[in-house]
Structures are given as structure tokens and as C-alpha cells.
Image (spheres, grey):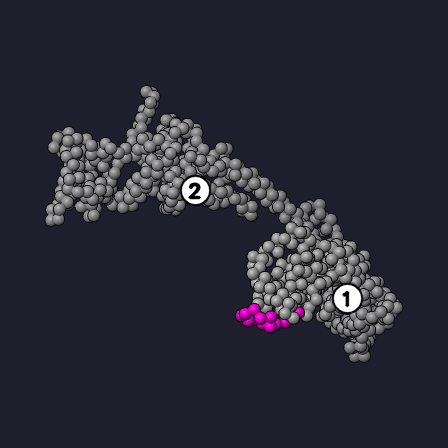
Amino acid sequence: MGKNGYYEGWEILFSDHSRPVLASRLIAEIEKGSDLTNGITRHQIAEDNQSYRCAHCRVPVFLAGSTTDGGQRLHLRHSTKSPEHKKQAEGCAFCNPNSEQRRLYNQVFQGEGEWHLRNKEKVADILSRDPRIDPDSVATERYIFSTEHDINIRRQPDIYCCDRDGNHWVFELTRWWLHPETAVARQQAYRRLGYNLVWLFSPECREKNRSTFHLLLYGSNYRDDTPAESLAGEEAQFNAFELSEAALTKSDSEGVLHLDVVYPHFVVDESLGSIDITYQQKVMSMHSLSLAPQQRLPYGVKTAVQLQQAKEHLEAARQALARQEEDQQRLRQARELKDIRHTLGTIRQSLRSESMNDDLAGLYRSLIAQCRTGSLHELTAERALRIGAVIEKAEKKVLAVVDSYLREKVAREEQCQALKEAARGFIAQFRGVPFSPGSELGTQGRILCDQLNKIRLFELASRLESVCSACHRRYIVELADEVSIALGKHDRSQWLLKTRPALAALVQYTGECGERKLQARLEKMLPIIDNHGVYVHYRQLESELAQPGTLPPGLIDEALVVYDLLVGAWFEELARKLLTSLVSRYQKQAHSDFYSLLSWDENTDYRELLPLAFQVSYDNPAAIATLLGCEEASLARLPDISSYYVGLASQIVGDFFDVLGAALTLFLATVEPGNSPLQIHRHDAVVKLLDDWSLYIASFQSMEEQVSVRAYFDDYYGEAFKTLSDILSLNMACS
């Protein structure tokens, strides 16, 4: 019957346990035992009919059925022989096998009840294993009564326990909707009792049961449309506790109940002037919660201060929005005033050009009417009166100019024709010819452009200006190319100095014309001309550093002198580039300097390089300066080069140990079996190898190092070294 749902959700109370057990679980445990165990259990229930009771109606139960195949399966039944028990079991959902009420209860168990019962047992079990909890105090569905005679309180929490510090805890598991009055009544009752009430939500409750979740998180006044800024203020700690899988996993592993604390985080949306709420979570032990049972519910994360800060931030943001609105109002007025002034300025400028025509006259009247009707309402009354007077004055000027326009029309047409012919002739004659903006041709072109603009021949003026600009640009590019070539030559210094004033004038011209790239190119040339000798020296050094091969002595000292001159001439970028090139080139040179130490060669004399490499590895400035061919003072200014040489030398002299060992092993491989002195080859090479080994040992600074390296060599190559020495001695004796 248990597998068919007969016992789904049915809990049994028995005297040896403080918590109820599912009937299906109890039957399963009994079925695991022997027939003798089943008989003892039946006898125990028969002798003491109060040992096993239905948790729903408190009526005693007994075992029925059999564990053998073919018979009715083992199950529990209510003991209703006495009238008292029969009456007591009438409303029980699990007494009548055909009860519709039991069927409905089983359906509930599949939803709320299944989660509720499963996790109630799990939480109670965790609390029982907690060393800070009195295990005898852990109980489920236990009635709690007030100890004060004048207070009538009876509550039955899902779980009750008491910790070693005397704190009373009650846990209520909830997954579905809970009536607000019920929630408030429970909180008030446990507060009066001095019990710490913890509501345990299922993980999906936050989305599927928002009303109950928010009620217990924020309080009874909360609604989904409640603005965050209206939440209760000081000392309000908004915490809800979820019985998540992560919390249960940690509880099982540590033997202490952990809860997933869900708490709001308040963020101000300054653009909307409101507070948005996001939810964050933190798994915490129940013993880390802050307790004050007679004043409030337990909490783990403080939220009151953050809420108050958000409210203060919101108030500041709203004030800022108000100020921003005022500023925008002022800006709108300023823009309107600016538009009016711009319109009037356009009219004045156009009137001065003396190019009045019928279309312009109509346009002026339209613009003035627009200033009168379309913009004045955005201004204050005082400003509107002042601007109105200005508009009226502009209107009078327009009428005066229109009157004079007819008299001057013929003269303007003649002048216009003459300027057209002059501009077209200039374009045809000088298109593509390079000339300076300050030359006679440049001045002539500017004058023609100005005259064309005055009589409103803008298209022809723009065409002439484009031709002149192209001629100027071609001239500037050719001059810049010539200067660039001259900058790399010592003998062009005088010519460069004479050309400098022209370049300076062209820098200003290119800036006015918007030729930013060309302007930047010319600007870079001016300080180079002023320090031409330093620049030429810099170019020579860069060229020398770019060449392959061994660098000459004194190059570092020379480069640092040029570096100081570049810095003094405000050529920081060139100075940095020179220093970077110098460091990079000498780091490559370091590998070349120590190349011969990468392998042993019988024709290489190591007596100078090997001790010098050791001194470099010991960070000896004099040795490094000797190797680089520079002054120690110069080396001190280039720590990147010095440290690179020290690091590479340390690696090389360390690897040379294995290089000597490899050469020793190779010589032994050429020795044939036997003791004849003729069986060893290359006598002089072997002698040199042994001498180089002695030189290697002697190159260490301290006697302790020499002894240590010699012992290390003996461990690895001592036997081979002795064999080679004996053969060498034999060979020398025979010879």
C-alpha cells in the first residue's frame, strides 16, 4: 500500500522518538528485519498501545498484514476498538482506506507536503547533530505553551530546539501562500514567548509565492507596487531564509544548520529618481544570526544602513534632477536668446556685404518676424523688451539698405563681372603652381576671394580658395620634404636656420586651414632645426645600433651624452626611443658576448672570458663595464642592461658546469677498453679540458663555493674525472 500511495504523508508518533516518522518509512524499516523482529515489534505495540500513535489524530495504531508473499502487505491501522478512539479517529484522513479526504491529503503531500515533510525531517536531523544544540530539545510538531498565566498562547511549530546558550528556536517551513494575519499572529506570539522564529522558504517560493515571501521579508505593509523608499526605515533588517540545496549540502557536511539568507540590495536610479531592488544571497550558519527575540526576528545581513544610504542618495539625486531642470530651463532661454542674436547678427553681416536683392529683403523680413513671434515667449519680460527694441532697430536698417540697393545695383553688377573675369583668369594661369601663402600670388588670391565673398559670389570664391589652398599645400609639402632631407646632413645647418622663419609662419597657416597632419610635421621640424647637431648625432647612433655585429667600446657613454642633450632640448620621445634601442641592442649583444661559453671547444681560450663572466654574475660593476666597454657611471644609469647581463651570466656560468661534464663524458666515450696509453686520443685537448675545469673552480669568489662546486662535480662526474686523469697520467708516463 505504501507504494500505491496509501501511506503518503502519514506521520507516526512513537515514544522512543521526539519527532514523527513517515508511516511508509517505518513499514520499510520493519520489512527489512527478520520474522522475529517483526514479532517483537507487533508484541511491543500490543503491550503498549500508546507507543505508536497517528500524528494526525493521536489514536494508537497497530501492525497488520504479513511480509510473506501472497498475503496482504504489512501496514499500520488505527486501533478503534474503544469508543473514545473511534470517535477521535472519525476526522482523521488516514483512518478510512476509502476516504476522499485522505486522497486529497496525498495530493497535497505531492506538492507542499512532500517538500515540507522531507525537509522538516532533514532540518531536525541536522539540528540533532549540532554540538551547540541540545539534542533532546529537538522536536517536530511540538506544542508550545506560555509560562505566564495571564497570556494564553499555544503554538505548534514545525521544528523546535534550544541551543546550549539557552536560546529557543522555532522553524516554520513554508512553500505556498500564507494568510497575512496568520503570519503576523505567529510572529507576535513567538516574540512574546521570547522565541527566535525562522521562516524557511523553499527556493522557488520567491517567484511562485511572491506575496508571502515579501510579507515575511518586508512586513505586513509591503505590496508589489510599493516604492522602495517608503519601506520602514531605521533598524529594519530585511532578511528571508531559503532552504536551498547549497545550504543543506553545507549543513550536512559541517553538522550545523546553514541557511541561504536572501536580502535586498537597494540601488538608486538617478535618471528616474527611484530606488531599484535587487536580491542577493549568502549562506550562513544559524549561530551567526543576530538575535533579539522579544524585539524582532533573527537576521544575518544588515540592510537598514544600506537602505538609509539609498534614501539619502535618492533625495540628493532628486534635488540634483530639480537643479538640472532649472539649469535646462536657463539653457533653453540662453539658446533662444543666442538664436535671436545669431539671426540678427546674420542680418547685420549680410547688410554689410551690400549684396541686397529682392529675395534677401523678403528673407530679412521673415527672420525679423520670426524673432518677434517665435522666440520672445521663452525670455523674461525685461529681456523681451530689450530684444524687441534691437529687432526694431534692425528692421529700420533693412529698409534703409533696400532703398539704397536699387541705386547701387548697376555699379555692383559691373564690379561683379570684373571680379569674375579676374578670378577665372587667376585660376587658369596658376592652377597647380606651388607658391607660398605669404607670397605675392598668395596675397593676390586672398584679396580676390574676399572681394568675391563680399558680392556673394560664394561658389566662385570657394573654387578660387580651393585652387590657392592646393597650391599652398603643394609648396609646403615640397619644402617639408627638402627640410627632412637637410635635417640628416651636417652641412645644411645654415640653410635650415634661414628656412626656419618660413616654417614657423607655415605652422600657423596650416593650423588656421585645418591641415593638422601637415602642421604636426612642420612643428616637429622646428626644435630639430634649433638643435640640429644633436639630432644628427642621434640619427647616427640609431643607425649604428641597427647595424649587426659587435658594438664598439664607448658607445654607451656616447649614447648617454646624446640622451642628456635630447632631454635638455625637450626631445623626450627621441630620448626614450634612443634608450629603448640601446637597451634592446645590448641585450642582444649579451648573447653574443657569452656565446663561446654555451659549449666547450678545445680551440677556445677561456682564461679571460670565463673569470669575467663569473665577475659579471656576481654583479661586479667594474667587470660589466669592462665587458661593455663603458664607464661604471654610465652603467649605473642603465640598470636594465646591467641586470640582463648579470642574469644571463649567472645562467651561463651555471650551465658551463654541465658543458664541462658533457665534454668529459664525450672524451671517455672515445677511450677503448684496456690500459694501453695509445687508447686515448687528443692528449692536448684532454689537458685543456682539465685546465678549464680548474679555471672554472677557481673563478668562484669564495673558498666555500669552490669546495661546494667541486664536491657537486665529484658526485656527478668524479669517477669519470678520475678515470680520465689516470689514463692521461699513464699516457704521459709512456710518452
Judging by the rendered image, the residue that carries numbered circle 1 is 552
Looking at the picture, which amino acid does disc 1 mark?
Pro
Mark on residue 290? none
Using a 10 Å C-alpha cutoff, classify the residue at mark 1 as few (fewer than 14 neighbours), some (14 to 19) or many (20 or more): few
Q: Nearer the viewer, residue 425 or 483?
A: 483
Above or below, 349 relative to 162: below
Quadrant of the drawing holding the C terminus: bottom right
Above or below, 647 relative to 107: below
Judging by the rendered image, the residue that carries numbered circle 2 is 283
Q: Position of residue 66 (x, y in %)?
A: 13, 43
Q: Would residue 67 be found to the left or right of residue 575 on screen? A: left
Residue at the farthest front position: 734
Write the residue at 34% across / 42% down.
175
Specify start and end residues of the magenta stretch as a single range: 670-686
Q: Nearer the viewer, residue 24 or 54?
A: 24
Q: Where is residue 397 in the image (x, y as percent from the top left)?
A: 78, 58
Magenta span contains residue 398: no
Can the viewer see residue 32? yes
Q: Position of residue 458 (x, y in %)?
A: 74, 69
Q: Position of residue 512 (x, y in %)?
A: 77, 63
Looking at the picture, which amino acid does disc 2 mark?
Val
